[in-house]
Image (cartoon, helix red, strand yellow):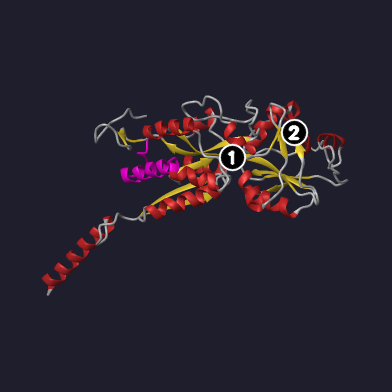
């Protein structure tokens, strides 16, 4: 009986071990990929990650939309497999990560000025006007400068309520970077950053928070990702671009903003593009990963799966999703540079992408 019990125990143990790596039908072990960061691309990530999981039933992708600042901190703490940010890392931030970080652009979008003014469905704004609204210089909607910019529109004698992000945000970074370029006053007083000390307005967390307050508050204006405004059907202002044209944030105008030579590391800004068709507050959003995936308790299988996810996002199928939900797909130049960056990812010197040989070894960093 003792021998039989031992045999049964060993048999169950063996079956249990086999089930860890595969089931009776030969499926792969369940794995998970975790990420955190920007709220701007969350609607896109929500769908593209869902589609990815449906095609690879052994994989779970978990993403926390906690803001770009939170995503960078989470990657630095190595509590997630990838971070996500709407602002690329500065040299100081890169140094703080203690290992080389790659920027994989996933799609493009626009920062729009959503507003709520009863009976007004057309509004023109310029960068300097936006700056002065958030600096508290322009306080009412019928300010002479706003009236002059909007001939034929009866703007109300109503206090302006600017809404801004309370969390560390890549959207805030892109918004403030644009205002630094077009407004010397903003550049001197506020500068650019993921979090700022605001001169006027009320705070809200995340793009959904800003969109929600604008939707509910008469006389309000807030900067949010274009897809949130489109989804909620919020009116947005036409912005005057560098060429002097008033443009909406559309897939075409955002794509036009990327009509320039992009750097190999994809740490690129497309704010205030000189393309005459460009929307002036356009941006890339990135997934951030460590180049060398061999750290902490990560396995090569973990790293390989992350590479597979990144390749899916920039595939024609993944980019098609972006266009369907009001994000601009990446141009060919960006896709090619992304592929090269993904190919640089390695596990202690061993390549994670198919190469000429099965065990291609690259220079470790």
Image vertical order of residue 214 relative to residue 11, above or below: above
Residue ranking furthest to the bottom: 1
Q: Which residue is mark 2?
A: 126
Instruction: Judge whether residue 209 is colored magenta.
Output: no
- What residue is drawn where x is 51% and y is 26%? 262
Q: Secondary structure at mark 1?
A: helix
Q: Secondary structure at mark 2?
A: loop
Q: Position of residue 25 (x, y in %)?
A: 25, 60
Question: Which mark identifies residue 251?
Answer: 1
Main SS of residues in magenta: helix
- What residue is drawn where x is 67% and y is 38%? 196
Q: Nearer the viewer, residue 165 or 221?
A: 221
Q: Nearer the viewer, residue 135 or 307?
A: 307
Image vertical order of residue 201 relative to residue 350, above or below: below
**Is 59 displayed left or right of 69 in the figure?**
left
Q: Quadrant of the N terminus?
A: bottom left
**Is 68 displayed left or right of 150 in the figure?**
left
Image vertical order of residue 160 relative to residue 253, above or below: below
- What residue is drawn where x is 73% and y is 28%? 183
Q: Position of residue 190 (x, y in %)?
A: 71, 32
Instruction: Judge whether residue 303 is colored magenta.
Output: yes
**Is 140 displayed left or right of 163 in the figure?**
right
Region in magenta: 292-316
Question: Which mark identifies residue 49?
Answer: none
In primary-sequence order, the first of circles 1 and 2 is: 2
Dividing the picture into quadrants, the one containing residue 180 is top right
């Amino acid at each position: 009986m003792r021998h039989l019990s031992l045999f049964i125990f060993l048999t169950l143990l063996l079956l249990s071990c086999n089930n860890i790596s595969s089931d009776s039908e030969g499926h792969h072990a369940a794995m998970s990929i975790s990420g955190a960061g920007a709220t701007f691309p969350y609607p896109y990530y929500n769908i593209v990650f869902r589609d990815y999981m449906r095609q690879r039933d052994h994989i779970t992708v978990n993403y926390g939309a906690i803001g770009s600042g939170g995503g960078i901190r989470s990657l630095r703490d190595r509590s997630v497999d990838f971070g996500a940010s709407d602002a690329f890392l500065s040299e100081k931030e890169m140094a703080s990560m203690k290992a080389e970080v790659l920027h994989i652009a996933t799609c493009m979008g626009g920062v729009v000025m959503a507003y709520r003014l009863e009976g007004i469905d057309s509004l023109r704004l310029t960068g300097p006007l936006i700056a002065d609204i958030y600096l508290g210089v322009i306080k009412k909607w019928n300010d002479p400068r706003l009236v002059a910019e909007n001939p034929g529109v009866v703007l109300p004698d109503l206090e302006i309520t600017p809404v801004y992000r309370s969390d560390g945000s890549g959207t805030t970074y892109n918004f403030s970077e644009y205002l630094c370029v077009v407004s010397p006053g903003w550049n001197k007083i506020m500068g650019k950053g993921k979090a700022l000390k605001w001169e006027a307005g009320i705070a809200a967390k995340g793009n959904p928070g800003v969109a929600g307050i604008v939707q509910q508050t008469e006389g309000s204006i807030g900067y949010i990702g274009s897809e949130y405004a489109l989804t909620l059907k919020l009116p947005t202002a036409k912005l005057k671009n560098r060429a002097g044209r008033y443009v909406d944030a559309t897939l075409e105008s955002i794509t036009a903003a990327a009509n320039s030579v992009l750097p190999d590391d994809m740490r690129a800004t497309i704010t205030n593009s000189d393309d005459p068709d460009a929307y002036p507050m356009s941006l890339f959003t990135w997934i951030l990963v460590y180049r060398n995936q061999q750290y902490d308790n990560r396995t090569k299988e973990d790293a390989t799966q992350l590479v597979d996810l990144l390749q899916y996002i920039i595939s024609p199928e993944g980019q098609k999703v972006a266009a369907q939900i009001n994000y601009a797909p990446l141009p060919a130049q960006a896709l090619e540079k992304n592929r090269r960056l993904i190919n640089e990812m390695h596990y202690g010197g061993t390549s994670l992408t198919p190469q000429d040989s099965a065990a291609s070894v690259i220079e470790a960093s």
